[in-house]
Image (cartoon, rainbow, N blue to C red):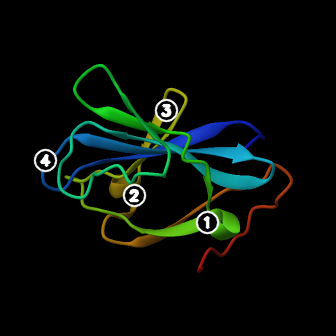
Amino acid sequence: MPEGHGWCLEWNHSVAGFPVLDCYRHRDGRMVLVRSHLPDFAAGLDHIPGRGTQVSDGEGGYWIENINEAVPGNAYRLRVGSVDVDHRLVFEDSRVSLSGLAADQAVTIRLMLPDTPLRENHDD
């Protein structure tokens, strides 16, 4: 992922069913959570005071902007949900359904720097 570019992890809330987004950016060699979109105050979707700034999305939901939290090790593990949850990676106008590829499996979401060679084995 080139410096300054970003992507989002999008999924359907397990109770309410609406899409939720966590958006990341490559900043200075680090994977940084920059903002989240929450269309409702459903279960588990509260804004934590002091963690970013909550702003209206103009449609009844809200963005939490300026989170700016670096992800330790530039990677995290995700237990991919079912096709109903439909975890998906969003980059520009493209969406890749992780649930379509690896439902109910653990995967690693990792920032790959442009000069990092791809590994054949991703067992971590």
CB atoms of marks 4 and 2 within 8 Å: no
Of the numbered discs 3 and 2, the one sitting upstream in the chain is: 3
Q: At numbered mark 2, what does the secondary structure look like: helix, strand or loop?
A: helix
Dot 3, how many residues are within 10 Å of its Cα: few (below 14), some (14-19), or many (20+)? few
Mark on residue 101?
2
Of badges 3 and 1, the one in the foreground is: 1
Q: Residue at x 66, y 75 (%)?
A: 121
Q: On the image, which quarter does residue 39 sit in?
A: top left
Mark on residue 16?
4
Q: What type is the residue that disc 4 sits on?
A: Ala
Write down the residue under mark 1: 75
Of the numbered discs 3 and 1, the one sitting upstream in the chain is: 1
Furthest residue in direction right, as rendered: 115
Furthest residue in direction front, as rendered: 50
Of the numbered discs 1 and 2, the one sitting upstream in the chain is: 1
Q: What type is the residue that disc 1 sits on?
A: Ala
On screen, residue 115 versus residue 26, left or right, reads right
Q: On the image, which quarter does residue 124 sit in?
A: bottom right
Write down the residue under mark 3: 94
Q: Position of residue 63 (x, y in %)?
A: 39, 35
